[in-house]
Image: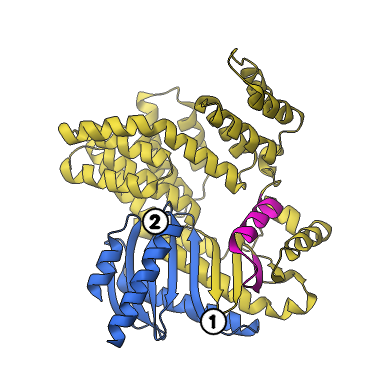
Chain colours: A yellow, B blue
């Protein structure tokens, strides 16, 4: 993938100036997060959004924990889509059609703006209740929320809208596939297989449907009466999951040497008085200063409360929190179920702490799952 | 108070707001259709209490002036108004710096309106 990008980018036109060339040379030598960001910035300044987006997308795949790269990726995607968004809005205002709402909702969903996507799609459903596209958009958003939150509520909402889309259009591939996948995830084998058979009925060579059918067929037979029970069972199993995920954070945070080095860097932020890292079970992995270890249970309770609440309020998965008190600040970060706490006086400026956490913890953590392929 | 919350909700990206007492009793709410009052009040109260316990254990005073929470699909802001909290649920992509100004302004109006 990297070699492909470099070949593509070397086809620079005659108008290109040094900033892009210099950034490309640095990126070519060492394509780390900083070099990726500089190259994106160079292309943006050169107004080449197409290449900026290509680099940002590749960077996001290689460094999914980099908040800055993610931010650039989403922002550039949004800029590139803005002219189509304006055209669709004008078209809807003059002559609304269900496919226009569906397309606009899909663009917002693609851009990660779930709120606008849902608002558009719900409006489309209200205006055109017998068109399937908007139900599909809503269903896909709740499906994506479900895969992150693992909340039965999100999953049930996804199934409700996808089923409605299916009632209207029986052989829509996307609806059938997402619904089958959803049912497969929660072990509703008897519901998933007929949907996949329907796809294979009109697209017998579809490899995705075949592979999914094979996986679903291999699931154990654990039928339940009600659809809601499948989602409830699934959610219960996720909560009882004992195995620690092998994540990029685990590889760093469970390595005492790497962890001590990162804690040292965070501890040197002006105004910071203490840093504590908890593992997913709430045990203190490291604390600076050491006498902060006794805070483990209280901090675990704080972050668990935040995790539960964000899930139940359907605002997704808890990522970070900033608490301001009289003369002190406290920061909470969730890193794949590990917890990072930084606390200090009011000199510990939020923007500086965030930047440091991003560079020390998030950036430079490659996607180890991708690297292992 | 409801009018102040509704004016706050008119700002882009605000999904709903409510005022709860320090004990988690809801005083007033203006929540969007996808937010359930009882659930939000109970969860907000639980978060504030666990936060205070943690802060006390850390040796800080438990006067929580402001708590901003980021999640993958939204944000929440808790603002201490003395005897009550203003709780605001926001969408993910909101510009927090400018919205916080509006939220603090709403809290000021509610607090002084109550005193009056």
Q: What stretch is highlighted in magenta?
A: A340-362
Q: Mark 1 points at which residue?
A: B52
Residue A346 colored in magenta in the image: yes
Residue A290 lies left or right of residue A361; in this view the side is right
Q: What residue is at 32 percent from the left and 54 percent from the top?
A: B12
Viewport quadrant of the N terminus of chain B: bottom left
Residue A164 lies left or right of residue A344; in this view the side is left
Mark 1 nearby-residue class (10 Å; few <14, some 14–19, many ≥20): some
Q: Name the residue under label 2.
A: B91
Nearest the eye: A337 or B18: B18
Viewport quadrant of the C terminus of chain B: bottom left
Residue A27: x percent and y percent? 70, 30
**Residue A217 in sight from this viewpoint:** no
Q: Quick check: B15 above or below A97?
A: below
Q: What residue is at 32 percent from the left and 34 percent from the top?
A: A85
Q: Quick check: A43 above or below A233?
A: above
Residue A60: x percent and y percent? 59, 39
- Asked if the residue at tag 2 contacts the one at tag 1, i.e. Cβ–Cβ closer than 8 Å, the answer is no
Q: What residue is at 40 percent from the left and 28 percent from the top?
A: A200
Residue A45: x percent and y percent? 55, 30
Q: What residue is at 46 percent from the left and 46 percent from the top?
A: A184
Residue B11 lies left or right of residue A361; in this view the side is left
**Residue A193 in sight from this viewpoint:** yes
Q: Is mark 2 on a helix, strand or loop?
A: loop
Nearest the eye: A191 or A158: A158
Q: Residue B95 carries which label?
A: none
Q: Is mark 1 on a helix, strand or loop?
A: helix
For mark 2, name the chain.
B
Count of marks, rendered view = 2
């Amino acid at each position: 993938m990297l070699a492909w990008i470099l070949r593509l980018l070397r086809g620079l036109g005659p108008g290109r100036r040094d900033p892009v060339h210099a950034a490309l040379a640095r990126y070519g030598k060492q394509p780390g997060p900083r070099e990726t960001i500089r190259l994106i910035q160079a292309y943006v300044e050169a107004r080449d959004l197409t290449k900026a987006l290509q680099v940002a997308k590749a960077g996001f795949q290689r460094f999914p924990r980099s908040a800055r790269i993610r931010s650039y990726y989403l922002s550039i995607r949004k800029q590139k889509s803005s002219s189509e968004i304006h055209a669709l809005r004008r078209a809807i205002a003059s002559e609304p059609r269900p496919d226009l709402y569906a397309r606009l909702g899909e663009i917002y969903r693609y851009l990660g703006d779930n709120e606008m996507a849902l608002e558009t799609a719900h409006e489309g459903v209200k205006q055109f209740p017998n068109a399937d596209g908007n139900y599909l958009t809503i269903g896909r958003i709740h499906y994506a929320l479900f895969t992150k939150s693992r909340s039965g509520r999100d999953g049930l909402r996804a199934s409700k809208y996808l089923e409605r889309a299916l009632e209207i259009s029986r052989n829509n591939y996307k609806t059938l596939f997402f619904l089958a996948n959803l049912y497969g995830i929660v072990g509703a084998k008897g519901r998933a297989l007929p949907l996949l058979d329907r796809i294979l009925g009109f697209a017998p060579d579809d490899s995705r449907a075949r592979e999914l059918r094979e996986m679903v067929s291999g699931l154990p037979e654990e039928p339940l009466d009600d659809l809601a029970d499948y989602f409830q069972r699934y959610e219960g199993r996720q909560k009882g999951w004992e195995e620690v995920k092998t994540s990029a954070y685990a590889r760093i945070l469970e390595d005492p040497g790497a962890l001590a080095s990162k804690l040292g860097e965070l501890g040197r932020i002006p105004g910071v008085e203490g840093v504590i890292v908890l593992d997913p079970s709430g045990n203190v992995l490291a604390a600076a200063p050491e006498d902060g270890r006794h805070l483990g249970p209280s901090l675990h309770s704080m972050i668990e409360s935040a995790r539960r609440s964000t899930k139940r309020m359907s605002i997704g998965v808890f990522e970070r929190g900033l608490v301001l008190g009289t003369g002190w600040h406290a920061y909470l970060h969730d890193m794949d179920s590990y917890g990072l706490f930084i606390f200090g006086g009011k000199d510990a400026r939020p923007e500086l702490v965030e930047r440091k956490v991003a560079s020390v913890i998030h950036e430079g953590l490659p996607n180890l799952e991708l690297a292992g392929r | 108070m409801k009018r102040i919350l509704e004016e706050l909700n008119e700002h882009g990206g605000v999904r709903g707001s409510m005022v709860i007492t320090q004990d988690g009793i809801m005083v007033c709410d203006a929540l969007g259709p996808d937010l359930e009052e009882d659930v939000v009040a109970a969860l907000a109260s639980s978060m504030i209490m666990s936060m205070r316990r943690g802060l006390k254990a850390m040796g800080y005073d438990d006067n929580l002036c402001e708590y901003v929470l980021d999640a993958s699909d939204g944000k929440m802001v808790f603002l201490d108004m003395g005897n009550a909290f203003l709780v605001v649920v926001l969408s993910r992509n909101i510009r927090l710096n400018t919205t916080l100004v509006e939220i603090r302004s709403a809290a000021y109006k509610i607090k002084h309106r109550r005193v009056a």
